Structures are given as C-alpha cells and as structure tokens.
Amino acid sequence: MKIIVLGGDGFCGWPTSLRLAASGYEILIIDNLSRRNIDKELSSSSLTEISSLEKRIDVANKLIGNIKYKNIDISKESKKLKNIISDFQPQSIIQFAEQRSAPYSMMGDKQRRYTIENNITGTHNVCSAIVETNKDIHLIHLGTMGVYGYSKELGKIPEGYLNINIPDTNKNIDILYPTNPGSIYHLTKSLDQLIFQYYNKNWGLKITDLHQGIVWGIETPETKKSNFLINRFDYDGIYGTVLNRFITQAVNNHPLTVYGIGGQKRAFIHISDTAECIKLAIENDKFDKTKVRIFNQVSEILSVDEIAKIISDQYGSKINYLKNPRKELEKNDLEVSNDGLKSLGFQPITLNNNLIDDIRLLANTTKANFNKENVLNSPLW
Ligand code: NAD
Ligand code: USQ
C-alpha cells in the first residue's frame, strides 16, 4: 500500500513515516523544509542535531523500509501536487504540512498571514487535488484539540460533533462542535474543518480529522535505530511544547516556566502514540463516508502545574510562575472522549518515569545546544 506523508520531515511526520515504512507501506514524503527555514528565521534550532532529509531517507531505506521524498510547497505548487498524486497513486494521504506553532502565528502581521495562507491554502489544495485525481483516496489530517477551546462548559468534549436538541422539532442532530480557537494557528484548524465538511458533502471525500493533543517525547523505537534517524527536539518558547520544555529546563538548571498559575488543563499524547494512532486510522478505513470522521487523538489530561510538580519532584527544579504571555483561561476543567481510537485498539501510553528519563537523557547529551536566550521568547497576545 502506498501512502503520501505531507510534512514528513517534521516532528510528528518523520517518526510516523518511519513507523509506516517499518510496517511495510511504501512512503512518499512531500515537504518544503519550511520548518527548518523557520529555525533560521528565529535563530533557534532543534536540541538534537537532525540530519538532512536526504540523509535521513538514505539511512531509513537501509534500516527501516521504503521511503522517497519530493520537495514541494503544497500551498503554492498545486499543479505539481496533483501530478505527484496522479503518478504515485496513493491509497492514503496524511496531512501534517501546516505551520503548527500558536506563538509563531501570533508574532505579527507576516506570521499571521503566512500561517493562514500556508495552512488553509495547503489543506485546500490537497482536497482539490484528490477530487481531480482519485476521490477514493483516504485523507487523514492532523487537527488539534485547540479547535474546541479547553472548557467543560458543554460537558465532556465529544469527538468532533455535538449532539443537540432542536426545541421546535424536538429532534436531536449532530452539529460540528462550536469552535473556540485561542490563536491564529488554532483558527486555521477550525477553518480546515469547514473545508473538510464541504468536500465530504459535495464530492464524498473520505476524510479522517484527528484532533490531537500536545505531543510530548521525542523518540520512537524506529528513530532510535540510528543517530541519522533522530527526531527534532524543540524546547524554545515558540515551537517547544510544555512538557518537553520543562524536562529540558530541568536538565539545564533553568527554573520551570509556568505561565500564570498553571491551572491550564490540556490533553497530551506521546510521540510514539501519534504514529500508532495514524496507523490505526489508515488500517481501519471502512467507515460511514457521508460524514467526516473525527477522532480525539489524546491519551490523558494534565494541568501545567501538575506537570511542573512532577518534573520538579523528580529533578529538584525550581518552579517560576510567570505572567502569561497568552490570552487563555488561567484555570480550566477538561474532559475529553477518546473512545473512537480506543475502539480501534489504541492503548494510550501515559506519562511515566521511564519515558521522562528518555527525554532527560537526550536533553543531557545535547546540553551544548541549549540556548537560554530562546527559552522565554514567546510573543505576547
Ligand atoms: P512540524 O512543524 O515539526 O512539521 C510540519 C512539517 O510540514 C515541516 O517539516 C514543514 O517543513 C512542513 N510544511 C509546512 N508547510 C508546508 C507546505 N506548505 N508544503 C510542504 N511542507 C510543509 O510540526 P509537527 O509538530 O510535526 O506537527 C504536524 C501536524 O500535527 C501539524 O499540522 C500540527 O498542527 C499537528 N499537531 C501537532 C502537535 C504537536 O504537539 N506537535 C499537536 C497537535 C497537532
Ligand atoms: N505553557 C506554560 N509554560 C511554557 C509553555 C507553555 O505554562 O513554558 C502553557 C501554555 O500557556 C498553554 C499550555 O502550556 O496553556 C500548552 O502550551 P504548548 O506550547 O505546550 O502547546 P500549544 O501552544 O497548545 O500547542 C501545541 C502544538 C500545537 C497543537 C496543540 C495541541 O504546538 O501544534 O495543536 O499543542 S492542543 O494544545 O491540545 O490544542
């Protein structure tokens, strides 16, 4: 089976490409290396020294399985995208290729416009190319829990659709859960959802939208097979996500940077489970095509303060409660359904000391690359 992985050079896309290649799939990665270029723009870089994509693929072909690569910008080169899909004839396309940092999307005019144009046009180009080439292709998109906002106001967060009662008719219907994005980046994921609803309604496209929580961890069994396969490791205030940041801070004797009082509850998932859930979505593709299939790709709920205390207890780090650079609830309750992926066999990995130690060891061996200046560089919004 052939799969195109859009954004396959990124933090989630690379380990997923390896997992799928290891499972016998023929993989074509499409990536324009924009994430590597943003590192240069921000004068930041992955803590781990990642190989060029060509080198990664060369080693993966020897140790893991069949992976190829084409460099195109899916938001600007729609014709090339269409031709590649037509020639390669994939059964599934996985769409990771979006600008994924909320802080980056809030830096200013240039970054707001780039995030909107790159994410919306890119995702739309993929849908349109599927219509032009083969409407049976299964499109799997990486969305975010952030489309829902993070509140329990409407109860436990369901998987994409809210079942509501219409008082006039006393009928119950499913509507797309009302979106409540907290950044321009999260807004793009909310808009993606409408694109999917329309392409599903009008052309019957088969789409799975995975609303993923915050990914933590760096390595998977496949990335550990060679230093050339190592995954990227963001710890800066713009692309680094909270748990990986706190572990890096602990290793480098930096106080843990809790924004506000740390009462923000969020959904988390380990990087190895990201790859596993996508494999489950690919392999279980017989579903009711009259609707976009939405799963919450999450393992557990934790508050920022809980995470800080776990890390602080383990490594004796100081916790700093800082003025929050973001506009978000200082405290929220959160409950999320993840029954869909579980019904397909997903067995979530939850936060545990061995996996925290895995990251700590990696952060330790890459200490020379830690730049203190990049820890608190988030824009204010
Ligand atoms: P990433 O930035 O590391 O990877 C994205 C990849 O897509 C990069 O390699 C980039 O070069 C490529 N790309 C971006 N725009 C492109 C374009 N126009 N054409 C071709 N390639 C392009 O991000 P990630 O952490 O791997 O996230 C992947 C997806 O998963 C994103 O859509 C993100 O919103 C979603 N997600 C990530 C997390 C997380 O915690 N990392 C959580 C939830 C959802
Ligand atoms: N936070 C801190 N201290 C820090 C960094 C973050 O307290 O040093 C707080 C933030 O204020 C926020 C929470 O931790 O309340 C999460 O922030 P984050 O940077 O780890 O994650 P976020 O910006 O939400 O974005 C990440 C990914 C994004 C994905 C999203 C999933 O970058 O691509 O969509 O997680 S979710 O959060 O479920 O919407």
Image (spheres, rainbow, N blue to C red):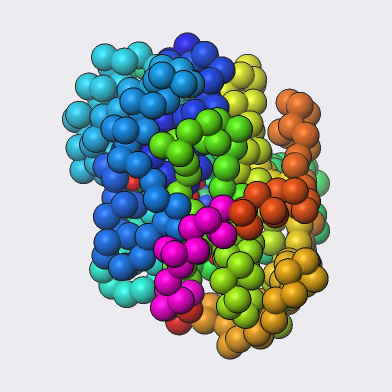
* Stretch in magenta: 362-375
Residue 231, x across and y down, in percent: 48, 44
Ligand number 2: quarter of image: bottom right
From what the image shows, is residue 32 above or below residue 261?
A: above
Q: Quadrant of residue 342?
A: top right
Q: Quadrant of residue 343?
A: top right
Tell me which residue sits at (42%, 63%) in the image. Answer: 369
Membership of 61 in magenta stretch: no
- Report the side of 185 relative to 362 (left or right): left
Tell me which residue sits at (28%, 16%) in the image. Answer: 86
Camera-nearest residue between 227 and 171: 227
Q: Main secondary structure of the magenta part?
A: helix
- Report the side of 33 relative to 282 (left or right): left
Camera-nearest residue between 171 and 62: 62
Residue 240, x across and y down, in percent: 50, 62
Residue 147, x across and y down, in percent: 57, 56
- Residue 32 appears in view: yes
- Report the side of 64 relative to 277 (left or right): left
Tell me which residue sits at (32%, 68%) in the image. Answer: 42
Camera-nearest residue between 362 and 255: 362
From what the image shows, is residue 322 above or below residue 269?
A: below
